[in-house]
Amino acid sequence: MQLYALGLNHHTAPLAIRERVAFEPGRLEQALRDLTSGPAAREAAILSTCNRTELYFASEAPQFAADWLARFHRLPLGDIAPYLYSHPERAAVRHVFRVASGLDSMVLGEPQILGQVKDAVHRAEAAGTLGTLLHKLFQSTFSVAKEVRSTTAIGANIVSMAAAAVHLAERIFERIDEQHVLFIGAGEMIELCVAHFAGAKPCSLTLANRTEARAQALAARFDARTLRMEALAGALSRFDIVVSCTASPLPIVGLGMVERAVKARRHRPMVMVDLAVPRDIEPEVGGLDDVFLYAVDDLAQVVEAGLESRQQAVVEAEDIIDDRVEGFLHWMQARDAVPAIRALRQYAESVRETELARALKLLARGDDPAHVLDALSHGLANKLMHGPTRYLNQAGNEDCAEAGRIVRQLFNLPERS
């Protein structure tokens, strides 16, 4: 059985495609059992997030996986085939190590993905589809991710606008988990911001967007609420943090709207992050005493400060991963040799038992023990050497030198002088 990874992610597929092959949590165990129900795959795990859907499986015929993925989601294979990648063995090991370490994420070094990989493993264990090979793979994966995070600065600096938004909010509110957060818009930047703020586990997440269906689709992925845009003015005072990024040509949140909200909040502070160009929030809002308004340029300064340090961490992390990939592949190769080792030991034990039985009979007959021991040793040596000797004698002229090299290496024999 060989190890494979197949899937698509934010690098290879747009959101519209990723949504079509995402697995609902309630159907994952059913999907895993279906994936391993035939002879093609004996072990499997499925990693499904908003940014990626990946199958990790052990198989001798990996071609089936793409067909299975399309069939399970009731899609024509042609709809998803251009976006799929397939990694055999070494590439699969390296890929999952990089994924869990945050090197393949939309936000470089983000920590949430490790928890998502662990959840995928727990679900595979519950479904009974995690065998020896994948169990070892994921235990090694968790070890590598821990090493990368503990020995490099991969997660120590802010390198995205979304992460910077959380960072700036934390300057004002010591605990994000006590705050209510509103997102205005439902595009890719807002999606990233929702993901980052969700990781901080705030009291609530709410999305407002002109296209309500799009807001609802995004909200469903993060257990968030939705708000109609026309209700924004009346509801603004309920939120401690507001993040906005739309394509509106004119501001959506005006000075008067925020003044009324601050008054209703009894001057409790409010953080507002405007990621839109042109701006969604009137610049004058930043002059209010109880409002902390940050625009794109403010976040860019935070991001720029972290980039250089994290890029150096990526180089260090890749070195760690390359080394650990070799270690895992060595384990796999040793595992492949187990049946041969077992057969060799069984053969040696059979020879030992046969010669011992013969020696005991001679001793029982009264033969000289010294002669019996000598005969026992000769019998063991002759039988154990029979196979290698026959191998050397049967090797053809062209293979003779190679056969000799193998036997010398196998028995640690000195080279001929």
Image: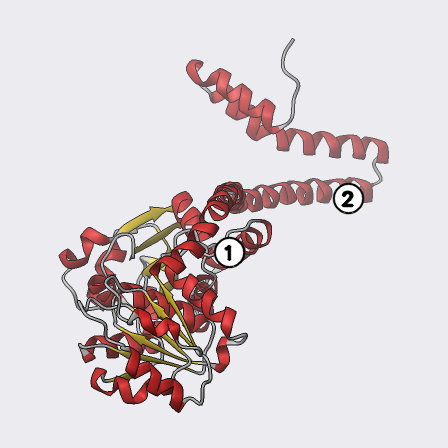
Asked if residue 142 lies left or right of residue 16, the reply is right
For mark 2, does the 10 Å Cα neighbourhood hold few (<14), some (14 to 19), or many (20 or more) residues?
some
Q: Position of residue 10 (x, y in %)?
A: 29, 57
Is 95 in front, or is 197? 197
- Residue 207 figure quarter: bottom left
Asked if one can make out residue 124 in the rendered structure from this viewpoint, the answer is no
Is 303 in front, or is 129? 303
- Residue 244 figure quarter: bottom left
For badge 1, the amino acid type reads: Gly
Is 140 in front, or is 224? 224
Is 94 in front, or is 3? 94
Q: Position of residue 86 (x, y in %)?
A: 30, 49
Q: Is residue 100 above or below residue 350?
A: below
Q: Report if the CB atoms under discs 1 and 2 are less than 8 Å apart.
A: no
Q: Position of residue 268 (x, y in %)?
A: 46, 84
Asked if one can make out residue 374 in the rendered structure from this viewpoint, the answer is yes
Residue designated by label 2: 360
Residue designated by label 1: 155
Residue visible at 32% across and 72% down? 284
Residue visible at 84% across and 40% down? 366
Q: Is residue 76 above or below residue 291?
A: above
